[in-house]
């Protein structure tokens, strides 16, 4: 009789055991860790850095120097990526936050989108290049999975810059609109501004990140949570990293002459709802980035590459001169294809030698 020591017997008839597969996936995912890239876009002074630090209870910008008014006049839009490793109860998250200082601060903001669009495309291109290479096991995913777009609370809705920016980016990234510094508005003003912003988003055909609908078999509490999150868009938030004492307990908030605004109090702002949305839908944000935005970029990129190669072959055939249509990126792809063919030939030779030895 076979020794079955160390294996528990299954009393339930017809039970195989693959119900434990989620536990395997969980252990593997926890061991590997998670990656997430968040972009924050908005005018200076809207509290972007403070909010991000409040969301993840960390300091992403310890050495940041805030430019004065004279330096801001000369400042152009540049992108700063800050990465931090966060660990909570054994789960590791590699968080990258891409800030966009200088956006919307100039008199003429017609070129504000260029650097941001270029950065997003660069990350897609890098991922495509790594995915096409030989060493695909250790690919670092720096694609933008979510973009918080900060809307000023001092206007009467969306500015032309807001509309233009979101229309240019909604097909490339998951946009989550955020009303900044909501503590300077009353509850009625916040509701009125939210309705106005959603009407303008719909009328301009802007596609923001849609929270996925719940399945019929989901828990009722989860369904209610998702319903409240959908109704809260755009999220009216305020951030703070200062601990204050209110009624004998420590809370993070802002102290005013008339009282304290508690950041994590749902009655004061949507901070908790924004954080809940980001954490509970982090996997979905990554999947939408992979299956929708990245696939759109990849198909367009490959279509342009094939068209460029066809034009190059035609030009070379007509003129008899080697074509220079293929760019630097296409040349790199060709080199990797040649390297892959060499590896395949070496593998075939090794297999042939092994068969001969046998």
Image (cartoon, grey):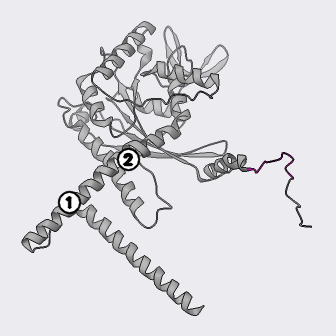
Is 21 positioned to the left or the right of 129 in the image?
Answer: right
The quadrant in which the C terminus is found is bottom right
Q: Main secondary structure of the magenta part?
A: loop
How busy is the neighbourhood of tag 1: few (under 14 within 10 Å), some, or many (20 plus)? Answer: some
From the viewer's side, name the closer residue of 295 and 236: 295
Looking at the image, residue 106 sits to the left or right of residue 335; the answer is left
Measure how far apart labels 1 and 2 are at the Cα level.
21 Å
Residue 104 location, x and y as percent?
Answer: 26, 30
Tell me if residue 194 comes above or below residue 290 in the rendering: above
The nearer-to-camera label among 1 and 2 is: 1
Which of the pair 176/56 is nearer the observer?
Answer: 176
Q: Which residues are magenta?
A: 9-17
Does the image show residue 324?
no
**Secondary structure of the residue carrying numbered label 2:** helix
Per the image, is 13 magenta? yes
Compared to residue 110, the image places residue 253 above or below, namely: above
The answer to whether residue 266 is seen in the rendering is yes
Q: Position of residue 246 (x, y in %)?
A: 62, 15
- Which image quadrant for residue 120? top left
- The percent position of residue 164, horizontal first and vertical second, equals 24, 30
x 54%, y 26%: residue: 242
Residue picked out by circle 2:
294
In the depicted view, which residue is nearer to us: 249 or 308?
A: 308
* Quadrant holding the N terminus: bottom right
Residue found 39% across the figure and 78% down from its top? 342
Locate residue 324 relative to residue 260 in the image: left or right.
Answer: left
| Numbered tag placed on residue 308 in the rendering | 1
């Amino acid at each position: 009789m076979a020794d079955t020591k160390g294996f528990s017997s299954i009393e339930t008839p017809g039970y195989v055991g693959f119900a434990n597969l989620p536990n395997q996936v969980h252990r593997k995912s926890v061991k590997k860790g998670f990656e997430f890239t968040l972009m924050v876009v908005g005018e200076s002074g809207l509290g972007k850095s403070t909010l991000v630090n409040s969301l993840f209870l960390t300091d992403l910008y310890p050495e940041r120097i805030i430019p004065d008014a004279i330096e801001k006049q000369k400042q152009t839009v540049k992108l700063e990526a800050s990465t931090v490793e966060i660990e909570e109860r054994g789960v590791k998250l590699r968080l990258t936050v891409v800030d966009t200082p200088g956006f919307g601060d100039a008199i003429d903001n017609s070129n504000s989108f260029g650097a941001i669009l270029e950065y997003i495309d660069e990350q897609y291109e890098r991922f495509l290049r790594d995915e096409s290479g030989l060493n695909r096991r250790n690919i670092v995913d720096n694609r933008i999975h979510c973009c918080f777009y900060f809307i000023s609370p001092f206007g009467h809705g969306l500015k032309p810059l807001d509309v233009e920016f979101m229309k240019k980016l909604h097909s490339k990234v998951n946009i989550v609109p955020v009303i900044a510094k909501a503590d300077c508005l009353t509850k009625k003003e916040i509701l009125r501004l939210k309705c106005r912003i959603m009407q303008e988003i719909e009328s301009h055909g802007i596609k923001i990140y849609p929270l996925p609908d719940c399945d019929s078999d989901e828990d009722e509490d989860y369904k209610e949570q998702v319903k409240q999150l959908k109704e809260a868009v755009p999220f009216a938030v305020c951030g703070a990293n200062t601990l204050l004492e209110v009624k004998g307990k420590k809370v993070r908030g802002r102290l005013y002459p008339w009282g304290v605004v508690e950041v994590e109090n749902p009655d004061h702002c949507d901070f908790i709802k924004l954080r809940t949305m980001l954490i509970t839908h982090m996997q979905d944000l990554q999947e939408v980035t992979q299956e929708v935005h990245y696939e759109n970029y990849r198909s367009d990129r490959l279509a342009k590459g094939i068209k460029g190669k066809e034009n190059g072959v035609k030009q070379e055939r007509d003129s008899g001169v080697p074509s220079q249509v293929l760019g630097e990126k296409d040349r790199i792809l060709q080199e990797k294809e040649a390297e892959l063919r060499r590896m395949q030939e070496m593998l075939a030779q090794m297999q042939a030698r092994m068969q001969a030895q046998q």
